[in-house]
Amino acid sequence: MKLINIDQNSSVPKYKQIIVSIEKNIDNGVLKKNDKLPSINKVALEFTLSRDTILLAYDILKKRGIIYAIFGKGYYIRSSEIHIKQRVFLLFDELNSFKEDLYNSFILHMGKEAQIDIFFHHFNTKVFEKHINESNGNYTKYVIMPTYLENAAKLIATLPSKDVYILDQTNPDLKQYPAVYQNFRNDIYNSLKKGKNSLEKYNKLILIFPGFREPVGMKEGFLNFTTDFNFESEVIVEFENWTIERGQVFIIPNDRDLVKVLEKSKRQQLELGKDFGIISYNETPLKKVVENGITTISTNFEDMGKIVAQMILIGQNEKIENKCNLIIRNSL
């Protein structure tokens, strides 16, 4: 029985006919896991096709996870899951509650015909490089959080450029790729401006900015705001040995530092929202109730997941800035 059938008079492109032939033979049980496919040369000679046409078909099936290649031997069946149309490589920096919201939203909006494989680089360049190298050529799409890692753009450039999407943070070195991103400089500036009336009852704004994971745009936007509106300010890299003084407001990107500030305020017997203030980064359900509500600057991570999924499904090639908002609560 022929594994590949080509209708020379059909308007369907030849590479698609090859894909459909293989899918049908998997579906009807003729082709099973680890069965070998006809060689590229054999198919090319039998149907008078270019090698590129067969390579294109096999490459698409490979990216979808349906077949795999062994160098020097040929192509083999990997999976019978022919309903999977998109196989997506998703590389996050880390997993936390708000990134989980993004991930769940992305999966939901990609639908049942997509397989999502998620990986984490934990802000480690070597881990980032390992994931990029090992994924290259094995997926239909690559969705990547590059953060500010050194050589990230160079490594991403090794992937098929038309299949790459940038998530959360972008920069001029990645301008050729579609992206859904946060504008950290503008977001913190505009959020503090929105809360300016509440901030005016305090006498000093302090940004806790270790600088290891936090985008530099946060610091730039903070300093631009405090300069433009004449607020006394300071940027500190760690809070551990800090003593909270009345009239201070802490802008806190990292939730670990948020816990430290709250714990120290208890020891100092200070009342949040009266003696001092807090603005935390990234909305979570817990921040709605802790200390009768923590003020947050946050993008909508569910929207971010939805937008990048829609971009992939319709082939949209744009850069979309995800909206950010200040949610004022008791802590301010």
Image: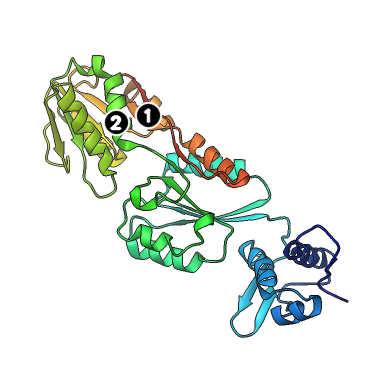
Residue type marked 1: Lys
Asked if residue 116 is positioned above or below residue 107 in the image, the reply reads below
Closest to the camera, between mark 1 and mark 2, is 2
| Residue at left offset 86%, top offset 63% | 9
Q: Position of residue 277 (x, y in %)?
A: 22, 23
The residue beneath circle 1 is 287
Asked if residue 185 is positioned above or below residue 58 in the image, the reply reads above
| Image quadrant assignment for residue 209 | top left
Q: CA distance from mark 1 to mark 2?
A: 18 Å
Residue 59 visible in the displayed image: yes
Query: Split into 4 quadrants, where in the image is the C terminus?
Result: top left
Residue nearest the viewer, comparing 207 with 38: 38
Q: Is residue 184 left or right of residue 114?
A: left
Q: Position of residue 44 (x, y in %)?
A: 74, 77
Q: Is residue 151 left or right of residue 141?
A: left
Q: Secondary structure at mark 1?
A: helix
Residue type marked 2: Ile
The residue beneath circle 2 is 188
Query: Split into 4 quadrants, where in the image is the N terminus?
Result: bottom right
Q: Residues within 10 Å of mark 1 (few under 14, many from 20)?
A: some
| Image quadrant assignment for residue 26 | bottom right
